[in-house]
Image: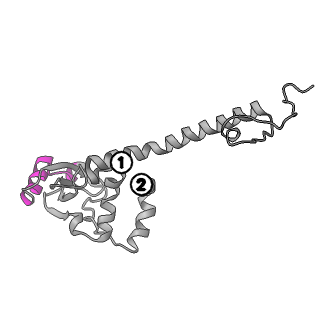
Amino acid sequence: MLVVIAFTGLYMNIPAVVEPALAAVAPFTERPPSVRTQGAAREAVWKVGWDAAYGRARAEHADDPVAGIGRIEARGYYQVRFLPPGDIMDSGTIRYFVDGRDGRLLGRFDHREGTAGDKIRTWQFPLHSGQGFGLAGRILVCVTGLVPLLLAFTGLWLWLRRTRLRRRCGPEPRPTSPAAGSGSCARPAGASSPTTAR
């Protein structure tokens, strides 16, 4: 599970590095190209308001609740997300893209109908957060996230324990029984302690 969390975190943090390698074996469905003219005034880019963009997407997708709506500023269109039953992500994976200039529907994306690459890309956050497997998945990810802290704590505790044992027993303690190797200090008969030798 730690490997899954590490990979998905790497993917989401540096997609520009990971996605080209993945696309070479599992291509993605491209999002609509930019409709924003370079140098265009903001008012010209967003002539259509939020309500109109939502209404356009809702007209195409009337069944599921809306999960969110946002503007893709660099490309000049709205993205409206819907949440179908049993979706793997709280923010919704079904997306409609609406032109900010005239309200035209530019495209639709549903990873369930997409390529293998689409499915892999869409699953990254649900795997990383545990959302893809409901409450049980979130609990598992939470517990897994505590494992490195537990390992660090137990490692420090064992190191401090060994350090204290070496200081108490001298530089080269010689365990003569199983008990001696588990925290006690034993020396051969007649050997003097470093703290009592004259």
Under tag 2, what secondary structure?
Answer: loop
Tag shown at residue 92: none
Which part of the image, by quadrant, shows the C terminus?
top right
Residue 20 image position (x, y, % from top left): 42, 68
Amino acid identity at mark 2: Met
Residue at (19, 51) in percent of width and height: 46
Q: How was the colour assigned to the protein in this rendering?
A: one colour
Residue highlighted by disc 2: 1
Counting residues from the start of the chain, the first of labels 2 and 1 encountered is 2
Q: Residues within 10 Å of mark 1 (few under 14, many from 20)?
A: some
Tag shown at residue 140: 1
**Foreground residue among 115 and 88:** 88
Residue at (75, 30) in percent of width and height: 168
Under tag 1, what secondary structure?
Answer: helix
Amino acid identity at mark 1: Leu
Residue 65 image position (x, y, % from top left): 12, 50
As drawn, is 185 to the left or to the right of 20?
A: right
Q: Is residue 52 magenta?
A: yes
Residue 36's place in the image compared with 165, above or below, is below
Which part of the image, by quadrant, shows the N terminus?
bottom left
Q: Quadrant of residue 113?
A: bottom left
Residue 9 image position (x, y, % from top left): 42, 53
**Foreground residue among 119 and 30:** 119
Q: Residues within 10 Å of mark 2 (few under 14, many from 20)?
A: few
Q: Are marks 2 and 1 in contact (CB under 8 Å)?
A: yes
Span highlighted in magenta in the image? 43-60
Residue at (27, 46) in percent of width and height: 135
